[in-house]
Every structure is written in structure tokens, then in C-alpha cells.
Image (cartoon, coloured by chain):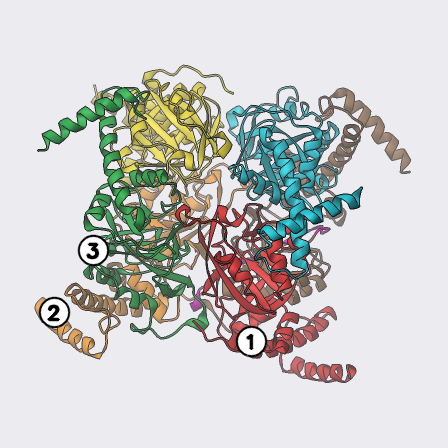
Chain colours: A brown, B red, C cyan, D green, E orange, F yellow
């Protein structure tokens, strides 16, 4: 289990403004490839988030494990009341969408505790309501069944799998309109910095391409283009001061 | 095959305004669990419906069964002309989305006959046009191929499977932005009543959660919260009179 | 490999305004059935296109094939710089959405070269940005991973499979809000003509159905309805002159 | 629903000795293509059968349909006691292998009633025991759960889907080590005759290929090869008299 | 997490001789339904086992977690050296068969330590060799890739999912030619006793069915059949003394 | 496309006697990971092969491409008559098992031309007969339908995908009871040598494990074990001279 490295609010803010495509590429530059969740999509367009993973693990329901719901013992409920500001609740549902993993009341509570996102490779119930709470929400489906129809809340803050990616507590979870990427906390600050630089460079390259440039020499940038980019970047900096 | 119990328009109206998540939970309270269709979604946001199931069953196409289309014999066509006001046409396509199960002209006819919804665990063709007719429409995909490329219309008004749920003629079919739930007709009135009560209580609980309450004591509600809820409910009643 | 028949801009324009459902039906009338791509959807509503297929084939990545990216040798990059105005880039990703097949900068270059669409049975990365470029874009998913995580660009302008349909260079590729259909170039002109006629007739039939007609006698149209249609069509022609 | 044509025991015997590959090809010659079941395999090598379809249809289990087991009412049980000698019991399980569709005691009863095969696109329970009864048995999996965990026996002797093929009561069902093919009863006699002839010809061709012949001229056979075949066939006939 | 109840060798022996179909039915009688693993099959016919679960959990591989292999730290290796006589190693591979979860050398070590079975919902590598070791082995596939190509060994002796069933350390794992069932340890002794009784009764019923009896009155057994069974059972007991 | 390096018969013989598990590990040592085919299994136990890939590519069937079968033009037929001794025919069927890719007569011809194996990620028809020809045969399924029901033979000797692995003409294809691995020809000789050495070492380690050794120090082997292995190896060499 990787050590959790503290990540500054500034880094989180930078990561939130970067695209998950850029972050995935930056992580690849670090040799960390299996980071973007498969088949996990935003509940509606316009969602974005960056926060620390708070993990919740579901197992398949087994009838001898069933107990009357007790908010002080039920692992899902206990977990929700431990959410800290800046957390992203990430739920391992083994990709099973035959039941929701959470409904709108609990999602609202996550939001009120300061949670900035909820992510599952299962489904939500009350999905239309969850989409309106104001918290970023990502899932593999919608399903009105309550979680215990299919799932048994097993543990919180253990390593999990979500969307075929390993997620550890305090990993940084970043989402945009494309989906969700997992950033190891020890790489977060450097990833944020490189992502900002890469997005700037890609903005310049996009401008060139829109201006009619071939990708040859432009993307990836050769020396001449890099030199132009440096000038453009300086100009831009001055322009913004 | 369950007996069909007559269901009042008022009940249908109540069910239509409840969420499928609430209705699924209420049915679970009756011990009826396998009711929400898997992988069946609205064609576009904002759709809702509640009506009696009119079932249509497709089998895999087999070439020796093919005949020239005859509106007076083709099972799909015959079925459409038997739709009654308030019906929801539910089509068993065995989850196969390699062809449409119906196009916009037939869907328009269902609408004109008073049908309030169409549901399939296959696909529609002309899906963008169907989305604009004014009838609630749910499916597992979009596919421009005509139904007989893959399907053979076999029977109407027999028990079917749709989205991994058993559907019987005259079951009540309710849809919202999350998907579709099947309500046995004999449970419809009681389900509607309980759903209305549950939604009221959950509105109260959501208010509490938005006000900063913990889920402990609130959701599920303990005695103190229930007492507050009763007061809130009385005040609300007075407020609306 | 079928011979490519030149297709006029007028034909392309006609095909673009027809629905893929209509075109699929017309092709079926020619005995050509397997033409509509399965599980390939527009990135956002409102997209449409008609153009010549420019094909790009991906194989599974194999590490001994990896080379430093060279825009003059990389098959994907070379292909993009060969796009001609009116082309639709169609990418065979074997239905694998575990990585993007292309990102927004390359998609922008396709657009700037005059490409009118991009289609893949894999995923895009930067999908939200691609959706805004102004080029029609169809895919089976979104994934931030770069193509070489999973794919190896193998060849351009060879026969490919996309969405379980065979696609040949210079096939005509038509897309609307429902998805993508492949039209053999030798059938394009006749398909466009028949599609226009079929859409006109279906507009008339839809009017009738909206006016309360039964499908019996109307859809398919019997002799009486056909006669009415001819009158309606003449009136409409006069109305537009 | 196709009319059932009586099929002689001699035809059944001929079909049983033909391979399903040959029968599938012969049916294709009649224009009937969708006949071989997908993902349905023999429980163990060496099984073969030919008999009339007796169909059993399962729907998804729904809790309000559950009743105490009553052999005189339960559709599965009633069906089993109606099996006639020469029948093949074919069970539509919607491809769902999460529970068995039948166990060894019921399969033994089918056998004792003269049934010559059981087929399902679901699973069996007690599969190892079923494999030893002496009845041909085909399925998509093995699963120890009893049928009602997942399935509800709905109807007997109605049209069903099995392995993505439509099956009607009294269709002829033929199985070998490759799987199961459905033969419309009206085509059975002619199919049997053609299959016998095709297998004879293919035996001759295989001899030629084993003797070193190219497939060119041999498979398909040209005039010269056909002439040789006629001589070979005559010699063979004499040899067997 | 359920408390582990000690289970006697005699109980294990009884469970091993019962079929998984019988055990699954007995557990259903206790209200425990989700117990039989889906898509997990024996490596070859003739395998059976009953033992205590020793769990190993794999997560998706993530490159920043990779370390040089160290037998004293690697979770898989550490786990194998903790296997006790009578254990069944159960590996949660999230149903992913794109790599083996274990090869023949490690499986041999499990066997030498007294392990009586290995189970995974992923694949093995060296499967043909594993099939010959003498230990019961169950998997969802065969794959020559080493585990770390796809998996990261994460924890031992935690709750896991395997074949869509929850498995806890010290659950009793029983396998036969049909597959694998999970028995909560607190139910093991009673399950073994009831299974033995049920198998005896089903042997009697099978004899009756083979003798030509209808299932009506026989299966389930009515009072008359039960009386006969009691006599048969007594006779049999005497016969074996 | 990688250059084909000539591979000696001795190397092929060595590869054929190594397990695919060993070869996959050796290739991983060269950094080549994606080499073992997913979901491709031997038709029956006891098959093994090593030979040069002769590739055949299928596309989805499209009706306008259909032509009367002509052995001199049909890509599948032409390919079969070009098979050279030592070749393995590898067929890209896009993982689609809804039809066979080849039957027993053609497989017999491949065998008679000196082909040592056939591999597909689709199905065979006449699978039981193919299993008896004497040629190693690997597939993802069995299906009696002829190839053109679903597939169109498109090209020979081009790069293909099979079982999610890229295969190039003249790659070395090795199969055993576990499945099929692809060895780039330039790595074949060195892979064969390393595989032989690795299998010898693993035989020694297995002996140690069977003798009761812990994996710690043994697997992977520490210096002491390696020294023992060297002595064992020398003894073994003397023993075999």
C-alpha cells in the first residue's frame, strides 16, 4: 500500500482544471499507465473534481451477512459520516450495475460533509436527483435497486478496484467530462505542474493546427515549434500581467 | 400468470409522480425485488410514464418464418392497433440491440392510440424522431436496422422478459429519468400510497440533511426525527391549504 | 475489394439529409443488410455527416513493434495528413475502448484538412474537446489513455471492420443522431435518390398517422394511400416553387 | 407458428447420424440460416440425438409469482410428465447460467419417459450426474443453484428462443459433439436425404484430399471429380451389397 | 465479517462426498442463497475437495506499486507459505482471465503444505501441469501470462469475492465436478448432516424414477413415498452392517 | 511490420517442447508482453505445435461482397493452397464465434500440405472431425455455420489480430494444452534457448518443492539453490550421456 503524501489545495485546484486526458499522459510519462477508469462516466455533462480518495468496498451480497440496518455499524453509513472536506468517495462495486450503490440522500450527506465527488463502477439510484446536488458524480449505470439487493458493504479505507484501476485511500481522484483518473499522491504535485505546462503547450499547438499547420513539426513539436512556443508563452504571460 | 387487478387513473398518476427508486423500495417492502429493468434507459432526459403493460414478444428471426408484411397478420402490427389509451407497449427483444424493434411511424401510431410509453430491452430505429413524438420511450440502444433483420414478432399479450424482469399483461409500468420499474397490478394502489408517503418523508429528510444533519438518527429516521416529521407534515398540509 | 465509384457532392448532400434508418432500409432493398454500425454513437446530439471512408486499422499493441513516435512513419499520423476534403476517417479499434484512438489535436487536424467526420468502434480521448471542434464524431466510448497503450496503428486505406460492419476505402459513410451507416459507393447515387423519395413518403405517412389514420392501409401504403400521396407530393412541389 | 409436419423414425435416424455441420449446410441450401444454437455445448463428448422439440419457457424469477412447489401445477414439472418417446426437451433460459434449469432426477424422468435429449441455453445442476444418465444433454454451463433462484417456469409448448435460435414445438432437434441444430419439421425428410448424400460426397472428397488432391477441382467438386464420385459411389454400393 | 466456527474433519469429509448441488440446496434451506461460484470450473474431471478458505486478493496492477519480487514481502508468496493443512486457497481475480493467478510451482507448494484445493475466478498458468499435481483446482480460464501482467497481490485473509460469491477466511469451500460452493463455517456441520440425508433420499428417489415412477408423489416425496423411503433406509442400514 | 527472421527447425522443435507458460515468461524478459492469445483453447487435450504464421483475415460479411465460390479467387481457398510445410494457419475472426471459420475438409488439406496447426479466435465447424485429423487446432468455440454466414475472407499474409494478440506473417506460433503464444521470429532462437534452460531449472525447483522445500530461497532461486542447480544439471547431463 503506497504511503499517502499530503497534497496541497493548490495542487488539487491545478489538477481539477487539467483534463483527465492530459493527466493520464503525464502519469504515463512517469511510467504509471493503468490509471484511467474504464466504463465510468459522469452522470451529466459539466462535472469536474479533484480530491482525496475515501474508499468503500462492496462484496457480493450473501444472505447470512444481512443484518438490520444500523447507522453506527453499517459500513457504508459509517463511511459516509467519516468523509472529510475535499474527499472523493470511491466505491468498488465490481462493475456490477444490477443495483444502486448509493441514493440521493446519502450523496447529499457526502456533499454536506464537504465531499467533492462520488465515483463507482456500479450504479446509483436516484441518479437524476444525484445529478442535481452539486457534487461531481461518476458511475457505470443507473439502477433503482438499493445496494443490498446485490452488494454487501464490506470495508472502508482499504485498497479497492474501481473501473479496473487500483485505488488506495488518499490517492488523488480527478474527474472531468471524459471520466476519472487516479493520481498516486506522491506524484500529485509534479503531475499538476507538468499537466499545466502540457495544457499550455497543447493550447499553442491547437492554435497552430487551427491556423492550418500540419502535424508534422507541430505535434509533437520540433525545435522550431518549441522556440515559437516559448515566445508565445512569454507573450501570453506578459499579456496576463 | 397473475390476475390483473384494475388500477385507477389516480393510482397511475401517483405512480407517475413517484421516482422509480422509491417505487422499487416500496415493492421491496412487499418482498417483490426483481422489478427494475437492467440496461434500459430513457431516450432523452425528462421522460416519465405510468401505464398498463401491453406486451409484444420477439423471437430470433428464422428465415422459414418470413412472410410478406401483412398489417392484418403481422404480430407487431396487429398489436399496435390494439393499444388502448393508458397502455405502455413493452417489447421483449432478448436484450439484442443489433436491430431496431420499432421505428418512428409505428411509435407515433402508439402515441395516437393513447399509448403513454414504449419500452424495449432491444433498440429503436429512428430513435431521434421517436424522442420527439411526445411519448415516453425507453430502450437499451439505437439501431437503424428494421426489426426483421434480427427479430421475429411472435406473440402479443403473453408473459415476457424485458431488461431481465418478468412482465405480464396489465402489470403497471412506471418510468422516469432513471429507467423502468414493473409493478404487479394487485400491488399498484398500495404501492402508490406508500410511495407518496415515502417521498414526503424523504423530502423532509433531505431538508434535514441539507440543513447539516448527520444521517445518524435522520436516515433512517429515529423516533425524534419521526416526531419532527409529523409536525413538518402537518405544517406542510396547512401551508398547502 | 469493391471498386470505388465516384460519388457526386450532390449525392453526398442528399445522403447527409436522409436519416440512417431510411438509408439502412434502402440498402436492404438492394439486398445489402449488414451496414449499420453496432454500438457506435455520436459524441453529442446534432451531429451528421456524409463522406468517403478513409480507413485506419489498429492492431493490438505488441511491445516489439513500438518505436519512437515519428510523424513521417507512424501510420496514424501519416494517415491524418493524407485526409482529403470530404473524407470520413474510420478507425478499426476491434471494439476495444480501453484506450483512445485519437485526441483533440489530431481530430482538429482532420477537420482542418477538410475531413467531415471521424468514426471508431473504440474510444476517443479529449472527447469533450472533440465534441466541440465542429466535425461529426462517433465512437463506442471515451477513454483518456493514448492509443498506444492498447493499439498499434497498422495500416491505412485497407479494408477494415468498424462496429461489426466491413468498411472499404471510398465507401460512403453517413451519420446522424442514431449512428453510422456504410453505403457501398456503387450504390450511393441510387440510395440517395430512393432515400429522398422514401423520406418524402414517410413524411406524408407520418402526417396521416398524426391525423389519426390506422397503420392498416397507410403503412405500408395501399393503393388508395399511394394515390393520395401522389397528389400530396404534387401539391408540395407546387408549394415550394 | 409453423405447422408441425409428421417426421418418420427413419428420417430421425438419418438426421442423428448426420453431423450438425452437414445439416446446417443443407438448411442453408433451403435458405434457412439461423438454425445452429450459439454457446450450447454437449455435457460430455460422444452425445448425439434427433427428436421432436418439446419446449419449456423460463422467465426471470419475480417474487410475487412464487408458490409452493406443486407437481400438478408447476409448469416445469407438468411439462416433464408430458414428454413423449422421441421428444427433446428444449428450455429457453434466456442464456442465463446463474442457476440450473434442471437437475439429475428430473433429467432421469425425461429419459425414462422416452425423451432422447435435453437442451438449454442456461445451465444444469447435477451436471456430472446428468452426463451419465444416457440421455443426450446440451447446455451453456453448469450451476448448482435450483432453477427458481433465477428462473420462473412460465409455459410449455410455446415458441421459444434457445441459443439465439427460434424453436417451435415439433421442430426437429439434432445434436452431435459440436452442438445443436433446429430443423423445421416440414424440411426434415428432405434435409435428411440431402444430408446423407452430402456426407457421402464429403467422405469421398476427404479421401481425395487425404490422397493428396488440391481443393481446386475437388472441393467444391468440378465435373471430373463428380464423375469420379459417381463411380466411387457405385463401387461402394456394390461393396456393401 | 462472520465469526469462524471450528469445523471437524468428519464434517469436511461429509461435505466432500456430497455434491455441490445438494449443498447449495441445503444452504438455500437455511436462507443462504448466493453461495455457488459463477463461471468457475474444475481444471479436469474427477476433482473434489472440502476445506477452509485461505483468501488472497488481487487488485488491478498499477505500475507505481511494482517492486522487485521478494518472497518475504510479496503478498502472494507470503500467503502460500502460510497455507495450513486442510486449507483451500481462494483467489479473487475480479473475473479477469487475461493473466494467470498462479503457476504450477506455487500450486505444488500449496499442495505440499497440505492445501486441498485452489480456486480462482481468474486463470491459472501451467494449467495442464496444475491439473496433474493432485490438488483440486478450479478456475475461469487458462492463461500463460504471469499474474503481475494484470494483477497486483494486495492482501491475504480478508473478505473477497470469487465467482460473484463473497468468501471469508475460514468459510468452508467445497468443490466437485460441477464447481465450487461456499459454506459459512457456522452452518457447516448442520449442512453436512442434512446433505448426507438429502443425498440418501435422492438416491432412493432416483431408484424409484429409474424404476418408472412419475415425479408426482415421488419428487418431492409425498407421505407414501416418505414411508417407503424410511423402510428402504432401514434396510440399507442393515445391509451395510 | 517486423522483418521475418529465418527460424531453424531445431528452434521450432525446442519451442514445441517448451510450455507456452515458459515461453510467455521468456518473452516478458525481452520486454514483449502481449503475446498469449486470450480465450483461444485447444480442441482437445494433447495438442502441441510450433510453426510459422500464415495469416488469414476475415471481415464481417457484407452482402454486396458475396460472390459464387471460386477456389481460384476465394481468399480462404487461395490461402489454404499456399500453405507450406511447417506453417500454422492463423485466422482473425474478430472473436466472433457465430459461424465456423473452416471445416474438416479444408483443415485436412492444410494438414496434407504440411501445415502443423490451425488457430482462430472464432470457431470451427466439424470441430469433432478436425480434432481427429492429426493437426493441432485451437479456437474460441465450435459452430456448425459456414464461414460466410458471418465472415468475409478478406486477405492473406497481412498483419492480423487473434485472441487480442497481433500476429504477423512468419511470426512463430507455439501451442500446447494451455493455448497459443506468438513469438516474434527475430526472438525465436534466443527464446527457445532460454526456454529450455528455464524449463530445466523449473524441473529442478519442482523437485525441490516436491521434496518439501519452501519457496523462500527456492523460487526464485537464491545463490545456494542456484549452486545446487548447477550441480544437479551437471549430474543430469552425465546421466544422459
Start-end of magenta stretch: A45-64
Residue that badge 2 annotates: E236
- Residue nearest the viewer, comparing B12 with D126: B12
- The residue drawn where x is 24% and y is 51% is D7
Would you say E213 lies left or right of E42 here?
left
Picture coordinates of residue C63, whole percent (x, y): 52, 28
Circle number at residue B188: 1
Which corner quadrant of the image does residue F200 belong to? top left
Mark yes or no: residue F44 visible.
no
Instruction: Using the image, determine if residue A120 lies above or below residue C126.
Output: below
Q: Does E183 appear in magenta?
A: no
Would you say D218 lies left or right of A218 here?
left
Q: Residues within 10 Å of mark 2 (few under 14, many from 20)?
A: few
Circle number at residue C182: none
| Labels 2 and 3 in the same subunit | no
- What separation in Å lies between label 1 and label 2 (alpha carbons)? 55 Å
Residue that badge 3 annotates: D133
Amino acid at each position: 500500500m503506497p504511503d499517502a503524501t499530503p497534497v496541497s489545495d493548490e495542487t488539487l485546484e491545478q489538477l481539477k482544471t487539467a483534463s483527465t486526458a492530459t493527466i493520464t499522459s503525464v502519469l504515463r510519462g512517469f511510467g504509471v499507465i493503468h490509471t484511467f477508469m474504464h466504463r465510468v462516466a459522469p452522470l451529466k455533462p459539466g462535472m469536474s473534481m479533484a480530491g482525496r480518495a475515501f474508499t468503500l468496498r462492496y462484496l457480493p451480497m450473501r444472505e447470512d451477512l444481512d443484518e438490520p440496518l444500523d447507522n453506527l455499524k453499517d459500513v457504508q453509513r459509517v463511511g459516509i459520516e467519516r468523509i472529510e472536506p475535499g474527499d472523493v468517495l470511491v466505491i468498488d462495486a465490481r462493475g456490477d450495475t444490477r443495483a444502486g450503490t448509493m441514493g440521493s440522500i446519502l450523496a447529499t450527506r457526502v456533499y454536506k460533509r464537504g465531499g467533492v465527488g462520488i465515483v463507482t463502477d456500479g450504479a446509483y439510484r436516484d441518479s437524476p436527483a444525484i445529478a442535481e446536488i452539486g457534487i461531481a458524480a461518476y458511475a457505470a449505470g443507473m439502477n433503482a435497486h438499493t445496494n443490498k439487493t446485490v452488494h454487501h458493504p464490506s470495508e472502508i479505507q482499504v485498497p479497492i478496484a474501481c473501473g479496473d484501476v487500483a485505488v488506495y485511500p488518499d490517492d488523488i481522484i480527478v474527474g472531468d467530462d471524459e471520466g476519472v483518473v487516479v493520481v498516486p499522491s506522491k506524484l500529485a504535485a509534479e503531475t499538476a505542474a507538468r499537466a499545466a505546462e502540457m495544457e499550455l503547450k497543447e493550447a499553442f499547438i491547437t492554435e497552430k493546427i487551427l491556423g492550418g499547420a500540419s502535424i508534422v513539426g507541430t505535434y509533437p513539436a520540433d525545435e522550431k515549434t518549441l522556440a515559437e512556443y516559448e515566445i508565445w508563452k512569454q507573450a501570453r504571460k506578459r499579456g496576463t500581467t
